């Protein structure tokens, strides 16, 4: 079967950035940052992106392009008869876990689009958010809509669907965020919020917040679950993987930081606690939109773009499972996509309901939603990342990785030695230390 491929460099950057940039940057990063002390968390997060995230991203791209297949098959091709393909299996489990709560939050963005259009953002956004997310059927309906939209795009296929939707809309999101930042920092009382984001208070940093920052780096860059292995397999041989990875990580981090600059000053101005949890962006920004000239227009645009950013990420999650079903189980693409979406809706509905009408839906003291959110990013993705780093550092022949990173000798990659040091020693050691210290604490 001929594999679809991205058209050129901008294609892969746009598509992988589309996967990376999503609710992770605008919804998850600010709420975690708010709960974990602000600036100190940001610093740890940045370290994790550069020292752990970037090397793993390069490793995933190299494995994918070398093997030219989905994550599961990639390991079977590169190391036949060995259990490394379990990394691919882990990725599929992670994709289901993430999609279940991701689609719930994606549904919230759709609800907020409708609200913005109809002028229905209330003067008490906190109460409004809570009453919506705890409603009996509305969150489910919107979650369903969100999944149906992602399904539609994945069905159309890689090139037309994923690439086209990312190319135009991500730059637009960036521009809008900058406008929102300018508005936020000029609100009266905004400086407290900026201080929270920029002035580190290391006494607030705990072992748990380091684990959360690392998990967020994995989540935000879409690492540790074979997503970028699959995307790497669509990249042509002559494309430069290293500069693409740098740009993707850079764009992803920029968007997350801008989201912080838009949200914390606004939160300070409206006396909303930064540690308000998963509702943070849905509470602070609507408050700000109400005070802006043309706020409803900004609000509509913002939630449309946020929804699209979420869609391009959800698509990449679906794609991991769909490419497995198509290539390993020989299902037709359309059927595979529909099947996966239906299977996601079940745990997804549990996530939505666990916040509202079925509060008893708890495990280990967490709601089902929090449990999926927590375990996927802080357990499944780092475990996947750990094994990917061991695989790329110690198992895959070095000259193969070098060839991929230098585009078959056509490009120079001056950080090769640094890369191998990080992927062999620092990345696996850092993940282990963060994990073991977590185990000891609990
Ligand atoms: N990176 C995406 C985001 O920030 C979420 C995601 C995680 C997508 C893992 C794919 C794989 O929203």
Image (cartoon, helix red, strand yellow):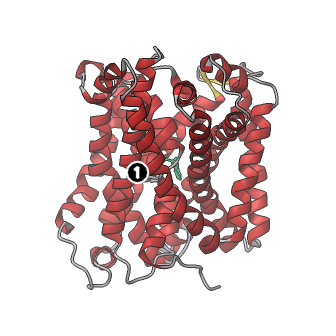
**221 lies above or below 321:** above
Identify the residue shown where x is 78% and y is 58%.
Answer: 339
Identify the residue shown where x is 72% and y is 54%.
Answer: 149
Determine whether, in the image, residue 338 is placed left or right of residue 172: right
Identify the residue shown where x is 63% and y is 31%.
Answer: 369
**421 lies above or below 101:** below
| Location of the N terminus (image quadrant) | bottom right
- Circle 1 Cα neighbour tier, 10 Å, few/some/many (<14 / 14–19 / ≥20): many
Q: Nearer the viewer, residue 313 or 327?
A: 313
Residue 215 visible here: no
Residue 40, how many percent across, how many down? 28, 29
Residue 384, how many percent across, how many down? 46, 52
Residue 102, how many percent across, how many down? 61, 42
**66 lies above or below 115:** below
Residue bearing mark 1: 252
Determine whether, in the image, residue 38 is placed left or right of residue 157: left
């Amino acid at each position: 079967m001929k594999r679809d491929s991205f058209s050129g460099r901008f294609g892969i950057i746009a598509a992988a950035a589309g996967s990376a940039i999503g609710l992770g940057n605008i919804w998850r990063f600010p709420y975690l940052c708010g709960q974990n002390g602000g600036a100190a968390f940001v610093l740890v997060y940045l370290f994790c992106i550069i020292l752990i995230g970037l090397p793993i991203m390069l490793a995933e791209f190299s494995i994918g392009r070398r093997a030219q297949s989905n994550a599961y098959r990639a390991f079977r091709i590169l190391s036949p008869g060995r259990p490394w393909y379990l990394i691919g299996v882990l990725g599929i489990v992670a994709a289901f876990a993430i999609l279940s709560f991701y689609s719930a939050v994606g549904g919230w963005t759709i609800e907020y689009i409708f609200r913005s259009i109809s002028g229905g953002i209330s003067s008490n956004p906190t109460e409004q958010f809570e009453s919506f997310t705890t409603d009996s059927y509305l969150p489910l309906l919107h979650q369903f809509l969100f999944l149906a939209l992602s399904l539609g795009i994945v069905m159309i296929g890689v090139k037309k669907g994923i690439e086209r939707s990312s190319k135009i809309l991500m730059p637009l999101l960036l521009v809008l965020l900058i406008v929102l930042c300018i508005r936020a920092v000029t609100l009266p009382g905004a400086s407290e919020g900026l201080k929270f984001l920029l002035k580190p208070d290391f006494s607030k940093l705990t072992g748990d917040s380091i684990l959360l920052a690392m998990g967020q780096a994995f989540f935000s860059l879409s690492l540790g679950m074979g997503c970028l292995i699959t995307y790497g397999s669509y990249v042509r041989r002559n494309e430069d993987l290293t500069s693409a990875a740098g740009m993707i990580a850079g764009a992803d981090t920029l968007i997350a930081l801008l989201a912080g600059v838009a949200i914390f000053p606004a939160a300070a101005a409206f006396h909303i606690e930064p540690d308000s949890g998963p509702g943070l962006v849905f509470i602070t920004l609507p408050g700000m939109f109400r005070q802006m000239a043309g706020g409803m227009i900004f609000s509509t645009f913002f939630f449309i773009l946020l929804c699209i950013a979420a869609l391009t990420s959800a698509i990449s999650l679906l794609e991991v499972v769909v490419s497995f079903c198509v290539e390993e189980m020989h299902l037709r693409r359309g059927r595979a996509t529909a099947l996966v979406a239906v299977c996601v809706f079940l745990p997804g509905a549990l996530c939505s309901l666990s916040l509202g009408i079925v509060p008893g839906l708890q495990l280990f003291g967490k709601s089902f939603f929090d449990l999926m959110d927590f375990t996927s990013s802080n357990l499944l993705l780092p475990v996947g990342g750990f094994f990917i780093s061991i695989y790329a550092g110690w198992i895959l022949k070095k000259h193969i990785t070098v060839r991929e990173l230098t585009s078959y000798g056509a490009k120079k990659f001056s950080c090769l030695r640094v890369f191998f040091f990080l992927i062999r020693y620092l990345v696996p050691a850092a993940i282990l230390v963060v994990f073991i210290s977590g185990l000891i604490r609990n």
